[in-house]
Amino acid sequence: LNSLRQEFERLTLEIIGLAGKRTNLVEEIAVEKIQRGLTLVNREVERNLRIKVVEQCVKNDQNPEFALRLVNQLIMESISKQESHFEKQEFVSAYDIFVKANNMEREGREVIHLEVGEPDFGPPVAVAESLTKAVVKGHGGYTQSSGILALRQKIVEYVNQKHDQNITADQVIITVGGRFAIYLSLVTSLRPGDEVIVIDPSYPAYSDCIKQAGGRPVHITTQLADKWNLNLNQLEESINQTTKMIILNSPNSPSGKTLDDSTLEKIAELSLENDIRIVSDEVYSEFSLEPHVSILQFPCNQIYVNSFSKTFGMTGFRLGYAISDAETIQKITKLQNISLTCVPEFIQYAGITALDCLNEAEGYVNEIKIRQAAVSKRLESLPVSFYRPDGGFYLFPRLNNETTNGSEFAERLLMERRIAVVPGTAYGKQFSQFFRISVCQPVERLMESVNRMEEILE
Ligand SMILES: Cc1ncc(COP(=O)(O)O)c(C=O)c1O
């Protein structure tokens, strides 16, 4: 054992020494890249490296799986070292703007909030009543970590009917909002060095959660000029042996784009061929102009995420859910159990009532559609370009004037006209000319806001 341990130690020190030499090279490469005006990441160089790693593994009769993950971890380390040499891009999130706007309000200045994705109509009255009743009745204890059976069964009925499925209650977990469902799904599925494809523009939490899990977000982008259509060839080209997940968001925040049947079918096929799991964030599903198509309708390895926040105006209730195969749900449940035990029981009871209020929710959805159409029409007379959304409750215009950008515009709009919007870079650094508007305000306030935008853009 002693001699084996000595050899073990020698090899470990050798690896550490080599990693140090590699890091020194990384710094030199960064300087060269900047001098030559090259980008920080070069996927072609990485691809060639992976080919060589696999060849060596095959020659040495070594499983390439671990080696490739290790290579990705080294690449991630190199990128973070090199990043400091490149110009840092300013990044302002919806939350940053929200806090700034709140501070202005505390100073007595009124702000119109078009930054947060929070329905202004609040939950149906029956939901509030059932929450109080649940507390009075003593439903304030711990529950199963996956959530109370009655709510899971209610979700099963709703989803099975909507998407013609045969899901069972053991395939559902109730989570603290859709956001935590996303976090749990990624953290339980990923290992350090795994790659996850994220389609930009994207909800920033995806990238953050992937990194939190030690994974590597690989961003592919859609373009306004292509009507935000996903280029399936680009998606396919981004897949390699370390790709473990693809995150979908339809309808998309911020672009309002939905993924149609044939695109979802192709993505599902690609995921099966390459043994990739799909996380499908469908929190805006009820806000689709056309009947919503879900990933659930396509055979593939998937985790479906939805929430009560948007459909029922229940953002502060923090109630969401995930659906997958029973084994995956068990794994996710274990992490929920470790981290926060369960969603408060009375809130889960309110969720049962919410699902009985779908008619009321439909009223909210129709109101959002009317607002989106009104803002779209009004925006046409402003110097911006945008796609008329297929769903969701945002608009994502691009400023035609290249002498300013989304961040400057958002800053001026807030400081000079007291309207809060989110700069496009929150959803991908390439969207510096864009800004996001949420239509979660009455139509008159929305129209007043666009008038003030026009004043700034004149
Ligand atoms: C795309 C997307 N997914 C998920 C969420 C999470 O919502 P919640 O955690 O309130 O359910 C949001 C919230 O803004 C979102 O925009």
Image (cartoon, rainbow, N blue to C red):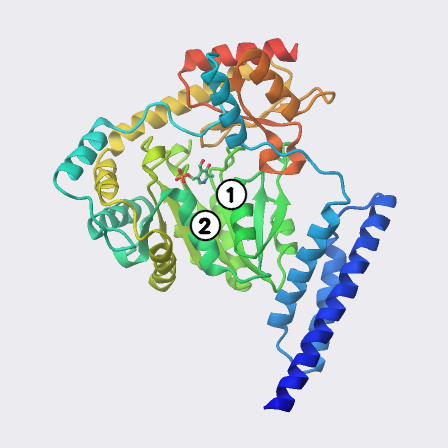
- Residue at disc 2, CB closer than 8 Å to ligand 1: no
User: Closest to the observer: 256 or 82?
Assistant: 82
How many C-alpha atoms fall within 10 Å of the one at disc 2: few (<14), some, or many (≥20)?
A: some
- Residue at 13% x, 37% y is 136
Task: Using residue 62 as the reference point, say whether residue 121 is left or right of it.
Answer: left
Image quadrant containing the C terminus: top right
- Secondary element at image label 1: helix
- Secondary element at image label 2: helix
The reply to whether the C-beta atoms of the residues labelled 2 and 1 are less than 8 Å apart is yes
User: Closest to the observer: 347 or 234?
Assistant: 347
Q: Specify the label residue 205 is tagged with.
A: 1
How many C-alpha atoms fall within 10 Å of the one at disc 1: few (<14), some, or many (≥20)?
A: some
- Residue at disc 1, CB closer than 8 Å to ligand 1: yes
**Would you place residue 91 above or below residue 214 in this image?**
above
Q: Which of pointers 2 and 1 lies earlier in the amino acid sequence? A: 2
Residue that numbered label 2 is attached to: 183
Number of callouts = 2
Give residue 222's position: percent from left, percent from top.
Answer: 61, 40
Task: Using residue 385 as the reference point, say whether residue 13 is left or right of it.
Answer: right
Under mark 2, the amino acid is Tyr
Give residue 51's position: percent from left, percent from top.
Answer: 72, 68
- Residue 178, picture quadrant: top left
